[in-house]
Image: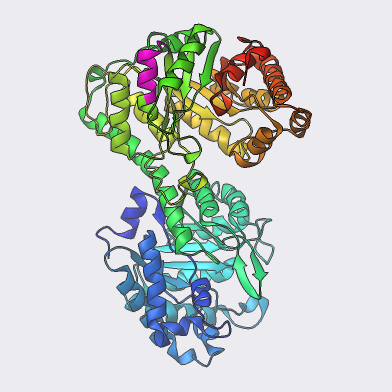
């Protein structure tokens, strides 16, 4: 058993649960008409192997294989007299698998028959059945109980009270609801959740099974406003489909992990999986959620340390934006900023990159954007590229700073190093997952995300490090962040943008945008917490390039009329001219609403970017 109690762990960080037991048993060859709960007795090695898979994947607790191990469900298999034997065996297997790493949660599901209000059995009979199962699990030493997949709120309340009669352990109580946020009996969560919350024995409330992650996110948004208890979620891996006579769940581990982060952002403190989730899903969920949870912990520790050991007088005020860099001066003065994005080379030769930067500077470009492992590809260090450009091209770089590839300690070290060498401008991004790039088996670190790193950098600008130590002189870094005006989940994007501003962001650069109205609408929505926004611009070079951006680059939306216009280019020169024309139209449409433009150099051709800016004639692009 872990050193801390379950409640202590829950109070300190997010908790990751395990995934499906039935799915894994079925995939391992168990027959659908078998009693899965009884396999804890007849095939203990199989059940133990599944538990161990979840522990190795990073689960903080594993559930006993006892979801249906009550006398009513077991009676269907002639096993009603083996409630104690099956539950005890299951708890022992879970404990052996969990070792000192994870907690053991006693799983209790519905009885499989209706309470008296819906006919068949009385509440007294139901209570006795729940007490019998809970007592067996408690005697076997489970650390907590998870009451899951209940559709009848009355039955769930009966189960909660029965558990409290025989055990003193935390209880996670979970309903299952439809996409309309109702149980199968038509009770809306807005009516059910307050009833569950009112039970004194309940530690956490939430949802499981039901539907896939997307619909559960919508329901969670309702539930979080109805209770002050910690929230628990465990969605299915999507809706099941029949493929070659096998029932399969189609949500990938990466998809589930993305929604797990959104559950966390809505306040979920216990995140697990239900039907269809496997150790692969839990591994990705744990990695993704703990990264952003650590971000909160990482930035809260310095603040807590600050309160206890650091007085305000010990911290220096951060430099004003206008005094940090030429970029900062222009942004603070409301002057338009021009920037061209040039990716580092794949090899070690920086001569061509530096010459491009010099050429851009000679035509009046303010800054050179240096991406950090764009689209999860491996290139020469963005930090080294930025240093060389600043030293040899005499133009300010904007160093993209990606959270994907470094741990927290390394990120602070690199940020301090960048400041000490004179790099003043950073754009902090979370980064694309490695699976989107050329090395899908690489490990994404993600100790913190862009919000957390923004807070840390803002503290460094005050002379406070992640451990709460003060230092002098502080860094003087202009803090930029990314923004996506066309995000699929715009509500989440707006919430994250507001958090970035609150964390200390001083300006933003958007993803490439191709629809003026979508950008302007985004700008209107962020007006209450507006910072200078630099619009990202991508001049297309061909119809193929436009198709690629539309279909294969995350976070980019290319309207059909743009694609249609790009399709009219018959030669390379025509296509480039159309791309430049479209970029100029976009810039003209939004110029008075943004702080400037960050124009990408497609395929490293800065002349195309300069033509889009109006600093070169399209005829000067060349080959």
Residue 26 in view: yes
Q: Which residues are magenta?
A: 385-395
Residue at image x 61%, y 56%? 189
**Quadrant containing the C terminus in the rendered view:** top right
Residue at image x 33%, y 48%? 12
| Vertical order, 224 against 92 (above or below) | above
Asked whether 527 or 428 is in front, the reply is: 428
Q: Is 394 part of what is drawn in magenta?
A: yes
Image location of residue 359, percent across then percent down: 50, 12
Image location of residue 27, percent across then percent down: 52, 74
The chief SS type of the magenta part is helix
Residue at image x 52%, y 45%? 436
Location of residue 588 by image quarter: top right
- Looking at the image, residue 532 sits to the left or right of residue 348; the answer is right
Residue 152 in view: no
Extreme residue in the front direction: 623
Location of residue 34 by image quarter: bottom right
Q: Is 345 part of what is drawn in magenta?
A: no
- Looking at the image, residue 86 sits to the left or right of residue 583; the answer is left
**Quadrant containing the N terminus in the rendered view:** bottom left
Residue at image x 50%, y 85%? 71
Asked whether 366 or 428 is in front, the reply is: 366
Image location of residue 24, percent across then percent down: 49, 72
| Vertical order, 133 against 226 (above or below) | below
| Vertical order, 364 against 195 (above or below) | above
Asked whether 298 or 608 is in front, the reply is: 608
Image location of residue 208, percent across then percent down: 54, 62
Location of residue 458 by image quarter: top left
């Amino acid at each position: 058993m872990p050193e801390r109690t379950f409640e202590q762990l829950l109070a300190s960080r997010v908790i990751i649960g395990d995934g499906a037991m039935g799915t894994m048993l079925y995939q391992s060859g168990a027959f659908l008409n078998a009693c899965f709960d009884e396999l804890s007795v007849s095939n203990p090695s199989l059940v133990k192997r599944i538990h161990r898979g979840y522990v190795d994947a990073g689960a903080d607790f594993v559930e006993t294989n006892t979801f249906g191990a009550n006398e009513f469900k077991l009676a269907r298999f002639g096993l009603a007299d083996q409630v104690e034997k099956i539950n005890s065996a299951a708890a022992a297997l879970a404990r052996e698998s969990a070792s000192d790493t994870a907690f053991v949660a006693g799983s209790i599901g519905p009885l499989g028959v209706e309470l008296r209000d819906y006919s068949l059995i009385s509440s007294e009979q139901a209570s006795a059945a729940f007490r019998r199962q809970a007592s067996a699990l408690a005697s076997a030493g489970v650390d907590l109980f998870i009451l899951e997949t209940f559709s009848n709120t009355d039955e769930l309340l009966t189960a909660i009270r029965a558990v409290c009669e025989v055990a003193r352990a935390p209880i996670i109580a979970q309903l299952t609801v439809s996409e309309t946020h109702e149980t199968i009996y038509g009770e809306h969560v807005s009516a059910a959740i307050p009833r569950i919350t009112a039970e004194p024995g309940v530690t956490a409330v939430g949802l499981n099974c039901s539907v896939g992650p997307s619909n559960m996110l919508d329901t969670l948004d309702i539930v979080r406003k109805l209770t002050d208890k910690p929230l628990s979620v465990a969605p299915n891996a999507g809706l099941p489909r029949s493929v070659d006579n096998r029932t399969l769940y189609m949500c990938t581990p990466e998809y589930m992990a993305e929604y797990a982060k959104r559950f966390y952002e809505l306040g979920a403190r216990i995140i697990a999986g239900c039907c269809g989730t496997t150790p692969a899903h839990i591994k990705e969920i744990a990695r993704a959620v703990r990264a952003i949870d650590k971000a909160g912990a990482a930035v809260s520790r310095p603040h807590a340390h600050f309160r206890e050991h650091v007085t305000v007088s010990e911290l220096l005020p951060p430099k004003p934006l206008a005094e940090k860099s030429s970029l900062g001066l222009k942004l603070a003065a409301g002057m338009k900023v021009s920037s061209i994005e040039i990716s580092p080379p794949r090899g070690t030769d920086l001569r061509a990159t530096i010459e491009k930067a010099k050429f851009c500077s000679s035509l009046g470009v303010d800054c050179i954007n240096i991406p950090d492992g764009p689209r999860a590809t491996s290139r020469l260090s963005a930090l080294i590229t930025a240093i060389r450009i600043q030293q040899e091209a005499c133009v300010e770089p904007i160093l993209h700073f990606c959270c994907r590839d470094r741990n927290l300690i390394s990120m602070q070290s690199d940020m301090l190093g960048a400041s000490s060498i004179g790099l003043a401008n950073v754009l902090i991004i979370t980064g694309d997952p490695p699976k989107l790039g050329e090395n899908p088996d690489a490990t994404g670190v993600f100790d913190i995300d862009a919000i957390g790193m923004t807070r840390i950098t803002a503290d460094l600008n005050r002379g406070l490090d992640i451990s709460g130590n003060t230092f002098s002189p502080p860094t003087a870094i202009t803090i930029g962040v990314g923004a996506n005006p066309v995000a699929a989940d715009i509500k989440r994007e707006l919430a994250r943008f507001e958090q970035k501003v609150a964390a200390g962001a001083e300006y933003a650069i958007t993803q490439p945008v191709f629809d003026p109205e979508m950008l302007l609408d985004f700008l209107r929505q962020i007006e209450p917490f507006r910072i200078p926004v630099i619009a990202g611009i991508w001049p297309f070079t061909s119809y193929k390039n436009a198709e690629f951006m539309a279909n294969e680059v995350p976070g980019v939306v290319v309207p059909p009329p743009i694609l249609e216009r790009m399709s009219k280019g018959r030669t390379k020169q025509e296509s480039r001219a159309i791309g430049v024309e479209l970029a100029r139209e976009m810039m003209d449409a939004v110029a008075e609403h943004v702080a400037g433009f960050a124009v990408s150099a497609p395929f490293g051709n800065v002349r195309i970017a300069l033509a889009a800016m109006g600093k070169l004639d399209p005829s000067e692009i060349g080959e």
